[in-house]
Amino acid sequence: MFAYVDFSYTEQDEAFRLELRTWLDENLPRFLAEHDSGEDDGDRQMAGEQSQERRRAWQRLLAGGGWAAVHWPVEWGGRDTTPTERLIYAEEMARYRTPGMFNANGIWQIGPMIIRWGTEEQKNRWLPSILNADEHWCQGFSEPDAGNDLANLRTSALADGDDYVVNGQKIWISTAHLAKWGLFLFRTDPTAIARGAKHEGITAFIVDLETPGIERRPIRDIADEEMFNEVYFTDARIPATSRLGEEGQGWIVAMGTLGHERAGIAGQATILGADLDAMIQTARSVNPSALDDPAIQERIARAYTEIQLTKLLNYRAFSKILKGEKNWPEVPFAKLQWSYLSQSLAELALDMLGPLGALARGGPDAVDRGRWTRLYSFQRYSTIAGGSTEVQKNIIADRAIQLPGKARLG
Ligand SMILES: Cc1cc2nc3c(=O)[nH]c(=O)nc-3n(C[C@H](O)[C@H](O)[C@H](O)COP(=O)(O)OP(=O)(O)OC[C@H]3O[C@@H](n4cnc5c(N)ncnc54)[C@H](O)[C@@H]3O)c2cc1C
């Protein structure tokens, strides 16, 4: 069916864009001059201490200008932005290639959940810490047998007096080793899975990661970094006052959180476009003959076209939201498209660099401090995190295209 997409902006939207650009023009160059980029790599989550301190400083500067959490209510330091303003924000921040934030997880996923589900006391206690980058936050959902099938999670939290006693294991928890706090999902009703009701009996908690009985073990990843962690709970006592929402509401809390994550993914086409420009520029200076190769030229043209397609897909999803419609099936399509594109772009970057592409970070001759070499390995994550490719394809095949599935064929 024909889907009408309105590309125009209102005067209010344009005023918002101008105010943001003016602020960035005034503050970003000064910040970049004062803070060496070190190992930081744009929006990607880096665990190095130097890059974390730089991120903290950048987030504080943003918060001071009211630009750290534009989607939060004004009373909590946000701007109560409209969906269009949020899109403008994502695109402008990407266009300026702003540094990453210290608490991106907290700002985009956890903060909105505390605002939605938290008591006044919880909001007062935690929102300023997230916004002002006082303490680092992480998100603890996945377990060894609960990734795509998140509702299969088994780490238990059993009420005992004023506390819950937690036992079990989480895995792949990004930056947990740096975090003071995390939003975790635990099973408060251990009978739910056996009853065939695994989405029930899950509860959300804000966890102080320095609690006795919690052990964090960083995992060395494909990019040779320790970015994510296993987190073990052994009779860890979490106060009942740290429960977010009621017992058994964890699935609804989590779905809201992942919804924000998907919105974040949808805004990444602009970043990919900036990456493509940057890698062409680098190739022009270190390996210019690559750009004369017709096969590389064709791949650049294809990448450019795919980036525009991704952008349009996101606009169409967004247009549906503005019209009060469900942004379906554009969201799973955009996730698939983004993950495929980001990996093929990283491969293109290395092929454009030629032999120099093999020089890893840390070496004296590494191009752009090894940024593209690292990206090539790290970008493998894009087909796993935020809903893996196979599962997205199943959803599209089953619910969007309605291909005959096993059940229907049978
Ligand atoms: C860089 C990175 C950062 C992360 N950070 C966090 C974090 O901060 N917090 C957190 O909680 N988690 C985090 N994760 C974990 C992430 O959410 C999980 O990796 C993701 O949900 C997939 O789960 P899994 O790894 O257990 O894979 P599985 O779900 O076990 O999947 C393994 C493979 O089986 C396939 N598969 C699974 N089910 C089906 C099916 N029904 N049909 C067809 N194929 C299927 C998948 O597509 C995949 O190829 C992170 C992951 C990465 C890569």
Image: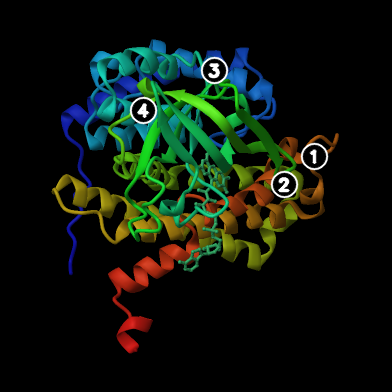
In 3D space, how far apart are the residues under numbered discs 1 and 3 (Cα atoms)?
27 Å
Q: Earlier in the sequence, mark 1 or mark 4?
A: 4
The answer to whether marks 2 and 3 mark residues whose Cβ atoms lie closer than 8 Å is: no
The answer to whether marks 1 and 2 mark residues whose Cβ atoms lie closer than 8 Å is: yes
In 3D space, how far apart are the residues under numbered discs 4 and 3 (Cα atoms)?
27 Å
Disc 3: which residue: 56
Determine the residue positioned at 61% across, 36% down.
Answer: 232
x, y percent for residue 278:
59, 42
Q: Earlier in the sequence, mark 4 or mark 3?
A: 3
Q: Earlier in the sequence, mark 4 or mark 2?
A: 4
Kind of element beneath mark 4: strand
Q: Is mark 4 within 8 Å of ligand 1?
A: no
Image quadrant holding the C terminus, namely: bottom left
Q: Which mark is residue 366?
A: 1
Kind of element beneath mark 3: helix
Mark 3 is on which residue type?
A: Arg
Kind of element beneath mark 1: loop
Disc 2: which residue: 373
Q: Residue 29, can we see it?
A: no
Q: Earlier in the sequence, mark 1 or mark 2?
A: 1
Determine the residue positioned at 42% across, 55% down.
Answer: 335
Disc 4: which residue: 243
In 3D space, how far apart are the residues under numbered discs 4 and 2 (Cα atoms)?
42 Å
Mark 2 is on which residue type?
A: Thr
Residue that sits furthest to the left in the current view? 323
